[in-house]
């Protein structure tokens, strides 16, 4: 069994082209703007709407929750905001958790950011936190994200048929997972090849931005949304 507050000291994760910084209320403006983005809503299956103070409250108290990890994705060479990565739904008894990532628009696709972020988070989850299993869900209309997950070692485990109703059409959801003992990780000595990573215990200074946050048991009771969804709209 893992400690229930395993994410108490959330570090900065540093890769070759990206840097993951913990989230704070300072990201509100970009976060709020993204909630109105139709493509973000579609790819996260979001039907809900929000009030500004609801969003502020989630951001304000996010770092008080030590059973999850929420990072802003920043471009390494200039600090530009790229999106968000999250580990949530932590189950310390079964040493498992959920993962999702979001990249902020087509300008960031096809550049390898999603792949690098996913590998950084997977390595952190297994090698630093000690998870045995990391799982996710992705909608069937998002093959880009599924290809990224497969590249990073996630395996398809099942299909939730007609799990999302969007624009009058029912959409399947795919469930995927990676285990610490999977051959894909064993073959790289526990780390994914091609990603130069380091970890810093530094805390975000409030100058970096993110778009939206993930589900949390201590957050307000939102319905499925960018604030609550486990789905991954983008990844590459």
Image (cartoon, rainbow, N blue to C red):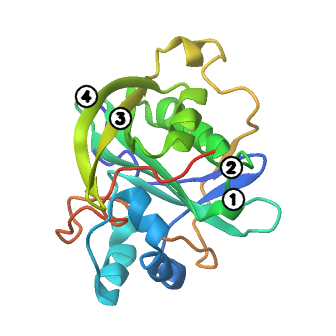
Name the mark on residue 177.
Answer: none
Q: Which residue is drawn at 57% across and 34% down?
A: 147
Q: Where is residue 32 in the image (x, y as percent from the top left)?
A: 45, 82
Q: Earlier in the sequence, mark 2 or mark 4?
A: 4
Task: Give me the C-alpha separation between circle 2 and circle 1.
Answer: 7 Å
Give the number of the mark in front: 2 or 1: 1
Residue annotated with mark 3 = 174
How many numbered discs, if any?
Answer: 4
Residue annotated with mark 4 = 94
Q: Is residue 121 visible?
A: no
Quadrant of the drawing holding the C terminus = top right
Q: Is mark 1 on a helix, strand or loop?
A: helix
Q: In this view, does 213 lie above or below 160?
A: below
Q: Which of marks 4 and 3 is nearer the N terminus?
A: 4
Task: Give me the C-alpha separation between circle 4 and circle 1.
Answer: 35 Å
Q: Where is residue 155 in the image (x, y as percent from the top left)?
A: 45, 23
Q: What element carries label 4?
A: loop
Residue annotated with mark 2 = 113
Q: Residue 12's image quarter?
A: bottom right
Q: In this view, does 85 lie above or below 116?
A: below
Q: Earlier in the sequence, mark 1 or mark 3?
A: 1
Q: In this view, does 196 lie above or below 45?
A: above
At label 1, counting other C-alpha atoms closer than 10 Å, the crowd grade (few under 14, some 14-19, many 20 or more) is: some
Q: Which of marks 4 and 1 is nearer the N terminus?
A: 4
Q: Do the residues labelled 2 and 1 touch (CB within 8 Å)?
A: yes
At label 2, counting other C-alpha atoms closer than 10 Å, the crowd grade (few under 14, some 14-19, many 20 or more) is: many
Q: Residue at x 72, y 70 (%)?
A: 80
Task: Give me the C-alpha separation between circle 2 and circle 3.
Answer: 22 Å
Task: Give me the C-alpha separation between circle 4 and circle 3.
Answer: 22 Å
Q: Earlier in the sequence, mark 2 or mark 3?
A: 2
Name the mark on residue 108.
Answer: 1
Q: Which of 95 and 177 is in front in this view?
A: 177
């Amino acid at each position: 069994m893992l400690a229930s507050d395993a994410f108490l000291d959330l570090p900065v994760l540093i890769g070759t082209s990206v840097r993951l910084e913990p989230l704070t209320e300072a990201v509100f403006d970009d976060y709020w703007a993204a909630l109105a983005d139709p493509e973000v809503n579609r790819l996260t299956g979001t039907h809900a709407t929000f009030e500004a103070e609801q969003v502020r409250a989630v951001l304000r108290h996010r770092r008080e929750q030590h059973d999850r990890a929420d990072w802003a994705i920043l471009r390494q060479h200039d600090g530009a905001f790229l999106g968000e990565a999250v580990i949530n739904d932590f189950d310390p008894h079964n040493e498992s958790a959920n993962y999702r990532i979001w990249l902020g628009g087509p300008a960031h696709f096809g550049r390898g950011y999603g792949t690098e972020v996913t590998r950084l988070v997977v390595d952190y989850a297994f090698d630093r936190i000690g998870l045995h299993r990391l799982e996710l869900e992705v909608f069937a209309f998002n093959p880009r994200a599924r290809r990224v997950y497969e590249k990073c070692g996630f395996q398809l485990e099942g299909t939730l048929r007609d799990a999302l109703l969007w624009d009058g059409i029912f959409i399947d959801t795919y469930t995927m997972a990676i285990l610490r003992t999977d051959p894909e990780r064993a073959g790289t000595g526990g780390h994914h090849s091609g990603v130069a990573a380091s970890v810093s215990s530094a805390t975000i200074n409030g100058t970096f931005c993110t778009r939206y946050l993930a589900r949390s048991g201590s957050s307000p009771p939102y319905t499925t949304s960018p604030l609550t969804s486990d789905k991954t709209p983008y990844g590459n």
